Amino acid sequence: MILILLISTIILIISNIMMIISIILSKKTFSDREKSSPFECGFDPKSSARMPFSLHFYLITVIFLIFDVEIALIFPIIPLFNLVNFIIWSKISFFFIIVLLIGLYYEWNQNMLNWTN
């Protein structure tokens, strides 16, 4: 018990010494403050949060998330080819690709992919 307490105390002392040395040796200046501030779509984080923004940024983000999740769901279909019958595998794959194409067609009809609006 005493050994565990001694080791944890030594680790605590060493970590505190390393943090203090890091703070002393770091070269932080006033201009580095801008690097650590959050940056979102080119807006100044210290300005009003109620500024209007382009809806295309939001739509492209949603489209990216949807297709990113769908691509992550396609990966398990590949090893499934060895486990199930080819007919079942082709039906699952065909259904999934049809859902992707219907989503793409819908986005195209809603002009979500058009930047000129």
Image: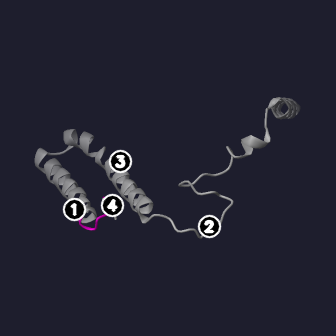
Mark 3 touches mark 4? (CB < 8 Å) = no
> Mark 4 belongs to which amino acid?
Thr
Mark found first going from the N terminus, 4 or 1 = 1
Mark found first going from the N terminus, 3 or 1 = 3
Query: Which is nearer the eye, 82 or 42?
Result: 42
The answer to whether residue 41 is left or right of residue 15 is left
* Residue 1 can be seen, yes or no: no
Question: Real-space Cα distance between discs 3 and 2?
Answer: 33 Å
Q: Residue at x 22, y 62 (%)?
A: 105
Mark found first going from the N terminus, 1 or 2 = 2
Q: Which residue is label 3 attached to?
A: 72
> Mark 3 belongs to which amino acid?
Ala
> Mark 1 belongs to which amino acid?
Tyr
Mark 3 touches mark 2? (CB < 8 Å) = no
Q: Which residue is label 1 attached to?
A: 105
Question: Real-space Cα distance between discs 4 and 2?
Answer: 26 Å
Question: Real-space Cα distance between discs 3 and 4?
Answer: 30 Å
Q: Nearer the viewer, mark 4 or mark 1?
A: 4
Q: Outermost residue, left direction?
A: 87
Q: Which residue is label 4 attached to?
A: 116
Location of residue 80 with respect to 1 vertically, above or below: below
The answer to whether residue 74 is left or right of residue 51 is left
